[in-house]
Image: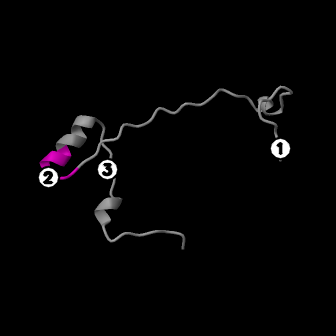
Amino acid sequence: MGYTSSNDMMAQVRLKFDTREDAIRYAENNGLEYRVTEPKEQRRRPMSYSDNFKFDRKVPWTH
């Protein structure tokens, strides 16, 4: 089937909150261990389709 499982269902639960303070308050009020991770900023290099076929490409384009 291609899926994995665990005996510890709580290890699979992830909660999302609007603010960091809301998440911490929820965990502390319910006596839960918590780890807050901040979302990473996505960095994309601006590139057009034609840049794939430039003569002076640093990495050669192959099929």
Return the mark for residue 54: none
**In the image, residue 14 above or below residue 42:** below
Locate residue 6, reporting x and y percent. 37, 69
Task: Give me the disc on residue 31.
Answer: 2
What is the secondary structure assignment of the residue under circle 2? loop
Q: In which quarter of the image is residue 38?
A: top left
CA gap between label 1 and label 3 equals: 42 Å
Which residue corresponds to mark 1? 62
- Image quarter of the N terminus: bottom right
Determine whether the residue tagged by mark 1 lies in a helix, strand or loop: loop
Residue 43 is left or right of residue 30, and the answer is right
SS for callout 3: loop
Q: Looking at the image, which residue is at 22% across and 35% down?
A: 21
Tell which circle, 1 or 3, labels the residue nearer the N-terminal end: 3
In the image, residue 32 lies in the stretch drawn in magenta: yes
Pinpoint residue 5: horizontal percent, then vertical percent.
41, 70
Within 10 Å of disc 3 (Cα), the crowding (few <14, some 14-19, many 20+) is few
